[in-house]
Amino acid sequence: AQSVAQPEDQVNVAEGNPLTVKCTYSVSGNPYLFWYVQYPNRGLQFLLKYITGDNLVKGSYGFEAEFNKSQTSFHLKKPSALVSDSALYFCAVRELNTGNQFYFGTGTSLTVIP
Amino acid sequence: KAGVTQTPRYLIKTRGQQVTLSCSPISGHRSVSWYQQTPGQGLQFLFEYFSETQRNKGNFPGRFSGRQFSNSRSEMNVSTLELGDSALYLCASSTTGTGNVRAKNTEAFFGQGTRLTVV
């Protein structure tokens, strides 16, 4: 079965500092991994994805994520956090070959402190 | 290209009533999924429709049902509403990408959601 874990409910970081939001996954085959961001009372917005190829994936708003197969991780990173990055972040894995379903993590609330 | 459209954006219903939510996917997307989001339970998968057929179903009671039309628009219905059904209901559309490891459009696109309040 596919699953995603986001071990931190809350991450606080000072503006200008690098940020990391953690995600680990469990899949039976090749993982298709995604990061989404959600602002209050809004839907989820796609940030980036890993399908195949380079382990470092670059996405929207300066975010990037590193796929690590040996550690089954897909952590979201940004070199310099902005106050406007404060939001809820979701990691997801998609099961393409069998069910097409997305599996989402529980979300991590990121607060960037001015 | 228009995004995913959910209507209505806000809804207030009374316990015991029923409600129907609508989702229009991005043109060309044939997969529509529904999620319930609450502060306590996070994002929970309800069901997914593809070509008018329910392909996946989450762990929700039978009061929650859905359907998809030939134009890929989807509706979700909740009967006999309970206070605990108060939530943000999100719809997402995507292409299938099934078995295609080089698929360019494997991500899901979400609507703004419908905020349902049951009183």
Image: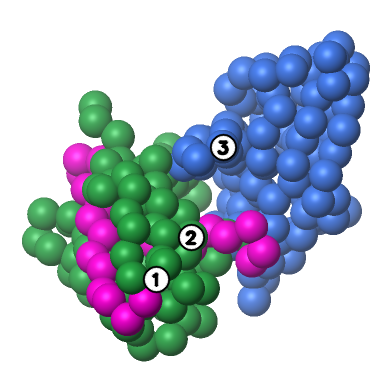
Chain colours: A blue, B green
Counting labels gives 3
Please tell me how crowded label 2 is: few (under 14), some (14-19), or many (20+) other residues with Cα within 10 Å: some
If the image is split into quadrants, where does the N terminus of chain B sit?
top left
Q: Is residue B113 above or below residue A13?
A: below
Indicate yes or no whether the magenta region holds residue A81. no
> Most extreme residue toward the left, as rendered?
B70
Residue B55 in sight here: no
Region rendered in magenta: B15-41
* x then y, percent, for residue B115: 41, 52
Of the residues shown, which amino acid type is indicated by label 3?
A: Pro
The chain letter for the residue carrying disc 2 is: B
Looking at this view, is B38 or A15 the one in front? B38
Q: Do the residues labelled 3 and 1 touch (CB within 8 Å)?
A: no
Q: Residue at x 18, y 55 (%)?
A: B73
* x then y, percent, for residue B40: 67, 64
Q: Are the residues flagged by discs 1 and 2 from a single subunit?
A: yes
* x then y, percent, for residue B83: 47, 73
Name the secondary structure under disc 3.
loop
Q: Which residue is drawn at 85% across and 55% down?
A: A7
Q: Which residue is drawn at 30% across and 34% down?
A: B3
Which residue lies under the disc numbered 3? A40
Q: Which of marks 1 and 2 is in front?
A: 2
Identify the mark at residue B47; answer none if there is no mark. Answer: 1
